[in-house]
Amino acid sequence: MKIAQVTPLYEAVPPKLYGGTERVVAHLTDALVDLGHEVTLFASADAATKARLIPVRDQAIRLDPAPFKSDLAAHMTMLSEVLARADDFDVIHFHTDMIHFPFFARCADKTITTLHGRLDMKDLPQVYERWNDFGLVSISDDQRRPMPFVNWKATVHHGMPADPYRFSPKSDGYFAFLGRISPEKRPDRAIQIATALGKPLKMAAKIDAADKVYWETVIRPMIDGNPLIEFVGEIGDHQKSAFLGGAEALLFPIDWPEPFGLVMIEAMACGTPVVAFRCGSTAEVIDDGATGFLVDTLEQAVAAASRAHLLDREGIRARFELRFSATAMARRYLDVYGDLLARRPFAEAPLEDVVTPMRPLEERNFASA
Amino acid sequence: MKIAQVTPLYEAVPPKLYGGTERVVAHLTDALVDLGHEVTLFASADAATKARLIPVRDQAIRLDPAPFKSDLAAHMTMLSEVLARADDFDVIHFHTDMIHFPFFARCADKTITTLHGRLDMKDLPQVYERWNDFGLVSISDDQRRPMPFVNWKATVHHGMPADPYRFSPKSDGYFAFLGRISPEKRPDRAIQIATALGKPLKMAAKIDAADKVYWETVIRPMIDGNPLIEFVGEIGDHQKSAFLGGAEALLFPIDWPEPFGLVMIEAMACGTPVVAFRCGSTAEVIDDGATGFLVDTLEQAVAAASRAHLLDREGIRARFELRFSATAMARRYLDVYGDLLARRPFAEAPLEDVVTPMRPLEERNFASA
């Protein structure tokens, strides 16, 4: 199948530091290539990809040191380039929210749009109802809740390649918190859970400028003088395996409608169970009692964290590979693309491209799209 | 003429507090109605206008207390409404930068777009070169400097209605600074000028969160213990006449490519001269030696400020009325609209609508558009 992937331009593909959406686009794109498809990635020139890259900006926007830049203009330039080549593709897969709708109004039926963000926002339903010929993919069923009546085609959970995450058969006896220090991530709950159990908690987290006051007034006072809590600051991808793999459990005590939560599957890739509050996507990502525990209260969280070491770490890794590998995600998207093409009145693609067979990995270099 | 005005949705039209673009849209729209035209304003429902209002959002975005909102989605909804009614208008006048281009690609020849912001930004030239069938209006000639080769149709300086500004025949012997406390506005220079002359300086300014550090570390230490400087904080529209009219001169010692600078013409409306650094639009707005002085150095600024009281305040007000009234602006735009229609191959509008005669104000209620 000839597939275009169109990413947001805020971060490199994959991101050099933070950035969930561009990371998922990177994994999906490479996995589709590995499955034998002809994939074109529209992205900034700093992308590292197995696909054919059409660079539409010299570098990703956020870390670009240019003092004045326009993210709207950058995306418009990209979309104009995609539109000029629209006939080259069977499917154009957008990860750019809604901004492409006015460009592609006349070929909406060959597009699919994954929404990566929270949807409980004013102004959004109007747009997705108005441009309802654009098929949408949610990254969790829960994400749809604020907009149930738009043109949803499927839910496709995120996936990540297993290789970069080292399976850790046993923990080093601490809990882990990984994310931003912000009120909706509830680092305060993580500290309370660890403190209640008298267990060490390692916190790897960045502190955005917007969250400085929360850090200084709420979290830092909870950490200062508390010998159980170790704040290790921001960590990079190469440190994640050791940090997550060493943990008895990842604490994910969120308090907002998390549309997916990549860190949960990163922990699972290392064999580490997740103790999560039932909120947003967590009930879809975690198999309660198998890959972690779902809780509703702090008391339940403390009890769950104390039992996390009883879970089967090998089983957790296996579950990750089955449900949340990049290949699993790519296969699910291929089904979505196939459905899209099957319903198009003038689909030119031959049937074998529409219904993609699962190919063993060894064949991937010989497969033609 | 049947004219649509399409405003950004960040502030009400006119803005309740700050907001340059929406203020200019408000004045232009009312002045076009006063000149007898049939004007439709697409804006949020809190607009106060003489035109027919098509409300496209319940309220302007910035002061909307909704915790999560999407400015992109709000503008897309508005543009979709404009597009649905495009046939109703002879001219569609956009103040929304570039976001409308993909919507109106097929009727670009009946649109005109005023660019209100600074243009020395990465990503912008590509977009304006790509969509070069959209005619553009600059708000000063200097604004064009970073993008000389795009489809410029005219420069139209901003205008404001004279009524709200009370002419002040004599000053109260102080200098005024009005704006934001930010490095590019150079409030430090204003303080230095006043201090060098031993004259009082009143500073009416807001301090954005982004400028807190600059305020605390640079400006506040210059004010503390300096008996000449009075910091009066933010002021509203109703206070401007007294604040500006009482001043011997407005100090406008900017250090950035100001595309227009409304405060200069607000001062002139009160009869108050402006001492401005030669930067951005200032040389186009100020008649050097008549409505103020243009300077290049702090020494020149001090000398100019000491002579400002010699300028003819009535002459300054008269110059404002001639060059910068809302009516002057509206007439200039009507010329632009007329040129646009004249060049359209299938212009349906009768000639008398294309070349708009200046109508005396008394006729305005009887004139048909």
Image (cartoon, coloured by chain):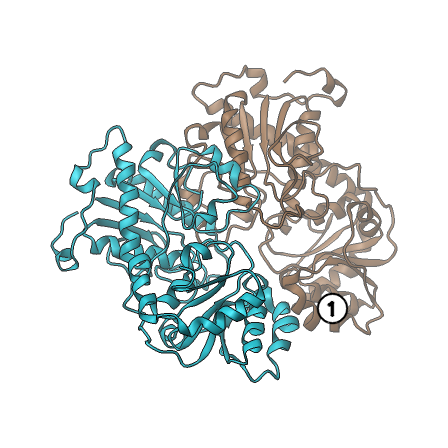
Chain colours: A cyan, B brown
Residue B96, by quadrant, is top right
Estimate the x, y position of residue A127 in percent, counting from the top left. 50, 37
Circle 1 crowding by C-alpha within 10 Å: few under 14, some 14–19, many from 20: some
Is B6 drawn above or below residue B178 in the view shown? above
| Residue A58 visible at all | no
Dividing the image into 4 quarters, which one contains the C terminus of chain B? top right
Estimate the x, y position of residue B146 in percent, counting from the top left. 48, 51
State the residue position of label 1.
B192
Residue A217, by quadrant, is bottom right
Q: Amino acid at mark 1?
A: Gln
Residue B31, by quadrant, is top right
Q: Residue at x 77, y 20 (%)?
A: B362
Q: Residue at x 45, y 70 (%)?
A: A250
Estimate the x, y position of residue B147 in percent, counting from the top left. 46, 48
Q: Nearer the viewer, residue B162 or A281?
A: A281
Chain letter, disc 1 residue: B
